[in-house]
Amino acid sequence: MGSDIVVQNGEETSGVQHRILADIAFYLSAARSAFAGTFKYQEEFPNGTVYENREYGFRDRTVGKIQGLLLEKLISYLVEEPALASLEYSRGQLKDLAEQILTTEILEERRIERDYYLKARIVGDVDSLTEDKNTLEELEEKVRALEQAEKKAAAAREEVKKLKKDIEIVKTRILLAERAITEESEEDKAVLDLIEQGDSFYASGDHGGAIDAYSEALDLDSTSTIALMNRGAAFLKKGDPDRAIEDFDRVLEIDSENPLSYVNRGCAFALKEDWDAAIADFSRAIELAPDTGEAYLNRAIALLKQGADYEAAENDLVHYITMHPEDYRGHLNRAITLSFMQKFEAALGEYEKAIELNRSEMSAYFNRGNTYLKVGQVADALEDYTRVINRNGVEGDVYYNRGIAYVRIGEMEKALDDFTRSIEFYPLDADTYLRRGWVHAYLGNESQAVRDWEHARSLGNETAAKYLERYGTAP
């Protein structure tokens, strides 16, 4: 759609000094239609106006005049524009929008003497308002999101305030606790000092001194579980399991779920050879604290001593080894268990591991010697027994077992010496007298054999009585 509009200022033209001549092209773009036109504008100014010698003043006046004429037409278009209908703008708002979308481009301008020529293009892009609408919707969505975030932030600020109050409360409690520790009574300090003394005595092997120190601590504080626990352990070391059990019972009265107390009391029951009670305590410790390795180890040893369930003992030892692979005790006791289960090859492998981890542990050599003896490796058994005997503080069991090994290979004189040494350690062991009697008989010492068998019979050995029927009594 096009049209030519000629605009002329209605002012009087006499005494003309300046003249504006302008060609303006106008283009309006909207979603539903378009409008285009060419406008000619002419205006004359008398001498002495404000526009004299100011070309930009001529330009502004010309463009402003044309834009004013176009605004009304543009507003009419905007009123009917579907993209803007939902916004429900007033006419004044539409005028503001119209002014915003009009853009002017100066194509040519020149001044010849007192004439000013201007050629320009004015464009109104209504579609940009649609984009603005989309932008507006996006901004409004952002505003809603920010408002929601602001609500959450307000809730978070309240939570922060609450947390800060909680922190202050906790700080106060910590401060009070630290103050309570600092202000510990002289009696509490005395108890701790006595417990430390007891620990020193215990570590040095003076278990009697340790018991005295712990007892003094308990005189000041009868509920000190540390003093009770440590005194019980000292009683165990002194070989007094009953007093130890009393202390551990008192600990459990104060703290019924103390796993270490069950472990220690189980050890006390084991010292009394009350295997059922020991196993029950070790099991309770495991229930309370499944990571208590000593409970598995001690329960396995109790099961071994009880001789009732070797498989359960091995399971406990496997569990303990998994927890403490570098502790020789797990491998040593598993080797003993496997030997009882007649799994001699596996047992010998575990003995090797135990010895690698602790080459000074003589019980590993002694028990490996026993396993060698069972599988007929007598020379290896003799080597292990001799290694143990060459160390100080050995007991009669080693001489007894080595005596049996010497008998196996016919070394009767050596066997006789070992049985005699064993009797020095265990003078009431009937079986050793019986075996030494055999050796005497083999060597032709019948009277000495009869005396050993009579001694064995007096100690309750029925086999010795059968030998006496055959050889008679000693002269």
Image (cartoon, rainbow, N blue to C red):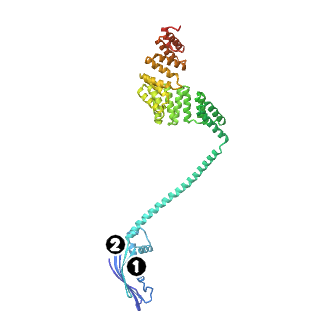
Residue at the spot 42% in from the left edge and 64% down from the top edge: 137
Looking at the image, which is closer to me, 53 or 253?
53
| Left or right: 452 in relation to 133 | right
The residue identified by callout 2 is 33
Look at the image and tell me whether residue 315 can be seen. Answer: no
Q: Are marks 1 and 2 in contact (CB under 8 Å)?
A: no
Q: Residue at x 48, y 61 (%)?
A: 147
Q: Which mark is residue 67?
A: 1
Measured along the vertical axis of the image, is residue 71 above or below residue 252?
below
Q: Position of residue 401 (x, y in %)?
A: 48, 21
Q: Does 20 sit left or right of 403 as displayed?
A: left
Residue type for callout 1: Gln
Q: Is residue 409 left or right of residue 169?
A: left
Instruction: Tell which of 454 and 85 is nearer to you.
Output: 454
Q: Residues within 10 Å of mark 1 (few under 14, many from 20)?
A: many
Q: Residue 463 — which label? A: none
Marked residue nearer the N-terminal end (1 or 2): 2
Rendered residue at 34%/74% (across/down)? 34
Tell me if residue 410 can be seen. yes
Position of residue 94 measured from the top left corner of the image (x, y, whole percent): 42, 73
Question: What is the secondary structure assignment of the residue under circle 1?
Answer: helix
Please identify the quadrant where the N terminus is shown. bottom left
Residue type pointed to by label 2: Ser
Q: How would you rate the neighbour count of disc 2 (Cα within 10 Å): few for under 14, some for 14-19, many for 20 or more?
A: few
For the residues labelled 1 and 2, the Cα–Cα distance comes to 20 Å
> Residue at 56% of width from left, 29% of height from top?
268
Q: Secondary structure at mark 2?
A: loop
- State the image coordinates of residue 49 (x, y, percent, origin top left): 44, 87
**Residue 330, image x and y in percent?**
48, 32
